[in-house]
Amino acid sequence: MNIKHKTLLLAVSSAILVEMGSQSCSVTSQSKISYVAKRDTTRSIAPYFTPATIKKKTPDAKGFIQRWLLLEPISKPNRGNTVFTDSYLRAAFATEYFPNQFTTLPKDGEKVKAGEQLVTWHALESTNYNVKLFRFAYETRKQYYGVIFWAVTVVNSPEEMKNVRMAVGSNSASMWWLNGKEAVLLSGDRRMVVDDCVSPRLTLNKGKNIIRGVVINGPGMSDFCVRLLDENGEPIKNLTITCE
Amino acid sequence: MKKNKIVGAAVLLSVLSTGTVIAQVGKPFIHDPSTIVECEGKYYTFGTGGGGLISEDGWTWNSGAVRPGGGAAPDAMKIGDRYLVVYGSTGGGLGGGHDGKLNTMWTKTLDPKSPNFKFTVPNVVASSENMEDCDAIDPGLLLDPTDGRLWMSYGTYFGFIRLVELDPKTGKRIEGNKAINIGIDCEATDLMYQDGWYYLLGTHGTCCDGANSTYNIVVGRSRKVTGPYLDNMGRDMLEGGGKMVLAASGRVTGPGHFGRIILADGVQKCLAITKPIWIKADVAYWVSVHYSGKTVGLLPGIISKKELMRLNPREEGMLWN
């Protein structure tokens, strides 16, 4: 069954296959997005996120990074996630959607033009170990299926650390960079799994390090989790996470 | 193993993708099948909407087991001298809003030709509203053989997989019982108990997209029915963990909706729904599991109608030491 994605959130012209996610054949083919919106008149990113503050923040007890600058989703329609091959992803992620997307360290509230869309960066702290991008999009009344999300954070290290691995889980595919160098690619139709993929050995600089990520999804619950592991595979927690 | 307990020609599936998948014959077409239940010498499975299959030998299936209520993805089991059926009132998720209700009802027989083929008024045992972190669909039942308690898992990719307790005498929710989160990122879950472990089987990936379907079945286990369910690498299913049980192989894709029936001591059959790429309908497949002692696994090979071949279990199977 196919449904047409309603333009309640953003103008989307592509059809999204409603059978994705194994739902019953008895479900009607007519979109219920408008039904949801009518029932859901008040939306809030709480309890999934709080606005980022300037208070000292370390990774959580298991080393997950919770403070991020998140860019509102950029429309990238895909009827399914099977297209997320390595070659597709490399092409999609090499595309420049907005100026300086591979180098920017944005500010909270900063707006960028991504094609015809004007999207905003939000400095947020996830209340969970993972960053629920679906909720970020839905609760801010943005497009939540067929999208690309960009995420940036600053990891401040008290010393140089060698043999560090970036461990990532994402829904669906994603790519991550540390200080401008590609660290890890998660390809295929993925669900978020803790430590699903780990990078080659990396070096954290003493002081500021920038982690940048991009997550793509067709239908499904966009999501990611990131932590840094030491050479023994243990989460690194003596870091501070900032947005600048 | 008793030969008369061997139901037709069993089908085996190699998890390591080299085995041959053989579908059941007849018209084994169904969506979201329930656990197979034996009733008065025949085998039944219910599906989404009006879907349902009946088999007299466990090999040849035809349509006919239609239950009331419609809705989606039922599960069924025999408790005492009657049968409990649970189903979701909605399809949930991408097809609509996330409001959902799970309903239980009883019947004295699964045979639609019997005058006793009547169902009680459904009881709502779990629900979801609006955009909460759970879709109340895809129920899976477990009657704990150690203490007789009745449990139900439910949920989809949208949020958490949850666990609630039901009263095995009434099929109703135990008063005061609170739902527990036991997994994420999967759907069509099922619970089973074996050799001191509780197993949570869930379906990951994308369904219902022909050859593009990425549906696959994973498992975690716990010493307690309330979890945590960890996979063979120690990953919690609440953090996306799950050991692969069944994925696409050969000419079939997107297996999901696991169910298990115990035919005899040491003989179990597991049902999964998958989609061969040469026909459009969903087809039910059997997966045989043989176990002896504490070592279990999914075994390769083909079992004849006459006898079971004893083969060596593999570590990569569904259950592990």
Image (spheres, coloured by chain):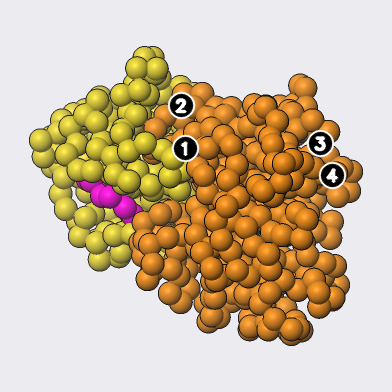
Chain colours: A yellow, B orange
Front disc: 2 or 4: 4
Q: Counting residues from the N terminus, which is met first, the one under dot 2 or under dot 1? A: 1
What is the distance, in whole Å, between disc 1 and disc 4 at their CAs?
A: 30 Å
Q: Which residue is labeled 4 in the image?
A: B81
Tag 3–tag 4 contact (CB < 8 Å): no
Tag 2–tag 4 contact (CB < 8 Å): no
What is the distance, in whole Å, between disc 3 and disc 2 at their CAs?
A: 30 Å
Residue furthest top as drawn: A42
Compared to B134, does A177 lie above or below? below
Residue B259 versus residue B299: which sits nearer the camera?
B259
In the image, what residue type sits under mark 2? Answer: Met
Mark 2 crowd level (few <14, some 14–19, many ≥20, 10 Å Cα)? some
Q: Which residue is labeled 1 in the image?
A: B91
Q: Counting residues from the N terminus, which is met first, the one under dot 3 or under dot 4? A: 4
In the image, what residue type sits under mark 1? Answer: Gly
Q: Which residue is labeled 3 in the image?
A: B168
Residue B102 picture quarter: top right
**Residue name at image x 26 percent, y 50 percent:** A78
What is the distance, in whole Å, between disc 2 and disc 4 at their CAs?
A: 39 Å
Q: Which mark is residue B131?
A: 2
Q: Is residue A78 magenta?
A: yes
The picture places residue A215, in percent across and down from the top left corner, at 33, 47
Tag 2–tag 1 contact (CB < 8 Å): no
Marks 2 and 1: same chain? yes
The boundaries of the magenta stretch are A76-81
**Residue name at image x 69 percent, y 36 percent:** B118
In the structure shown, which secondary structural element does the residue marked by tag 3 occupy? loop
